[in-house]
Amino acid sequence: MLSEKNIKLVVSTLTVVVLLVVVILNRKVLSPPSEIPYFIYYLPLTNALLNGTSFVLLLLSFGAIKNKNIQLHKKLNLAAFTLSALFLISYVTAHFFLPETIYGDANHNGILEANELTQVASTRTLYLFILISHILLAAITFPLILLAFYYGLSNKITQHKKIVKWAYPLWLYVCFTGPIIYVFLRPYYGF
């Protein structure tokens, strides 16, 4: 069995690797193929559904643990974790293939022109706040979730409770804001 120090090293390494992959794909360091598989166009909606479902599962999990139903709590958290992992795979895949979607880019040319900016000026600040907080908190939450799962599954309940105090509300926020970002961006997808 791995020591706690080694577990934290694995979590840190995995966090850095995932963040690097997301940045590399988001910045289009790797060129996607010229042909985009058709299912890729469904990934943004799929991502919103995965996040939204994880949000509901996390709320149900909270209710289960408040009712001292530990087995249901574990099952719901494992389901939320699985959906979040699927989200991450889908998100990375979508960002590899699809061009960046810019909030307000109504003509889908990849540039937010002055007239487009004028049309969304009142909501763009709100959108950017939600987007930036979502991204930053997702990056912070990722290692916390991994550690919370490690502590929970290895029955280190005191450590689990300490980390969940931070991880749970952050994870809930990230899962809640994911679908909101999709709703903001949906009119601006160029497909």
Image (tube, grey):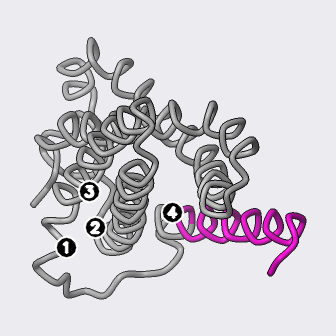
Distance, label 1 to label 4, CA atoms, is: 18 Å
Q: Amino acid at mark 4?
A: Arg
State the residue in front, 56 or 93. 56
Mark sitting earlier along the chain (2/4)? 4
Give the overall secondary structure of the magenta segment.
helix
Question: Which residue sits at x=63%, y=51%?
Answer: 148
Q: Is residue 34 left or right of residue 138?
A: left
Q: Which residue is mark 3?
A: 47
State the extent of the magenta-drawn residues as a range: 1-23
Q: Position of residue 25 (x, y in %)?
A: 48, 69
Q: Which residue is mark 4?
A: 27
3 or 1: mark nearer the eye: 3
Q: CA distance from mark 3 to mark 1?
A: 11 Å
Q: Quadrant of the C terminus?
A: bottom left
Q: Tell me the amino acid under the disc marked 3.
A: Asn
Vertical placement of residue 42 versus 77, above or below: below
Task: Give the side of residue 49 with respect to residue 128, left or right.
Answer: left
Query: Is residue 30 part of the magenta span, yes or no?
Result: no
Q: Which residue is mark 2?
A: 98
Measured in 3D between alpha carbons, the distance from the residue under mark 3 to the one under mark 2, in whole angstroms, is 14 Å
- Placement of 8 over or under 165, stated as above or below: below
